[in-house]
Amino acid sequence: MNAGLPTAGQRRRLALTGVRGAVAKSREFTREALRDWGWDGTETSEDALLLVSELLTNASLHAGGCHELLLTAGENLRIEVYDGTTTLPRRHPAPQRGMPGGHGLHIVERLSDRWGTHTHEHGKAVWAEIEASRLKSGRPTGR
């Protein structure tokens, strides 16, 4: 393990089924985890908060709501948002600049180092990862 990284596989879960204000609560939950793990106060940590917002908003708008947020720390920060549908997210081919909607997965793609989905017995999870080295340095992605 690299010095300054949280214990590999350290996890935090936030149950969100039926929770009002899930996006705001999830951002605060994530902000606290980032602070505890020594990954706060950088531009990249702000990107992580935006990823949480986008993933939860997408689950709310397109998948009937978010059931759970799971954060895993180690060599990467992995953000997973669980919902109750197996319908996979689709990226809009060309969202219109300056118009609301259709930008969420483009933002996720741009801010994360990797992202994807996996289905499970009760629905799916959409996940995004940011390398720990970026969270420590605050350097934006090289894309």
Image (cartoon, grey):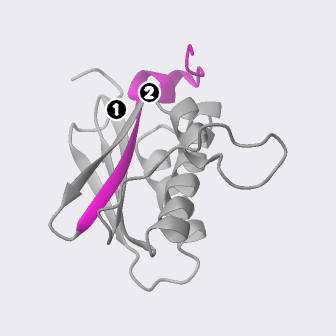
Alpha-carbon neighbours of circle 1 within 10 Å: few (<14), some, or many (≥20)?
Answer: many
Quick check: 134 above or below 107?
above
User: What range of the chain is rendered magenta?
Assistant: 123-143
Which mark is in front, 1 or 2? 2
Q: Using the image as rendered, state which of residue 142 and residue 102 is in the foreground.
A: 102
Residue in view at x 31 percent, y 56 percent: 125
| Magenta-drawn stretch contains 114 | no
Relative height, residue 142 to residue 53 (above, below): above
Mark 2, secondary structure of its residue: loop
Q: Residue type at mark 1?
A: Asn
Judge whether 40 appears above or below 56 on screen: above
- Secondary structure under tag 1 reads strand
Rendered image: mark on residue 113: 2
Contact between labelled residues 2 and 1, with CB atoms less than 8 Å apart:
yes
Residue type at mark 2: give it: Asp
Q: Quadrant of residue 21?
A: bottom right
Q: Quadrant of the N terminus?
A: top left
Distance between mark 1 and mark 2 Cα atoms: 9 Å
Seen as rendered, the residue at the extreme left is 121
Q: Which residue is mark 1?
A: 76
Where residue 79 appears, as percent x and y from the top left, is 39, 48
Q: Position of residue 25 (x, y in %)?
A: 54, 70
Relative image position of residue 118 (x, y in whole percent): 25, 50
Residue ID at (57%, 67%) = 23
Res 113 → quadrant: top left
* Rendered location of residue 34, percent (x, y): 47, 46
Q: In front: 135, or 68?
A: 68
Question: Mark 1 vs mark 2: which is more N-terminal?
Answer: 1
Q: What residue appears at the point 43 percent right and 48 percent down from the top-left corner?
A: 36
The quadrant of the rendering that contains the C terminus is top right
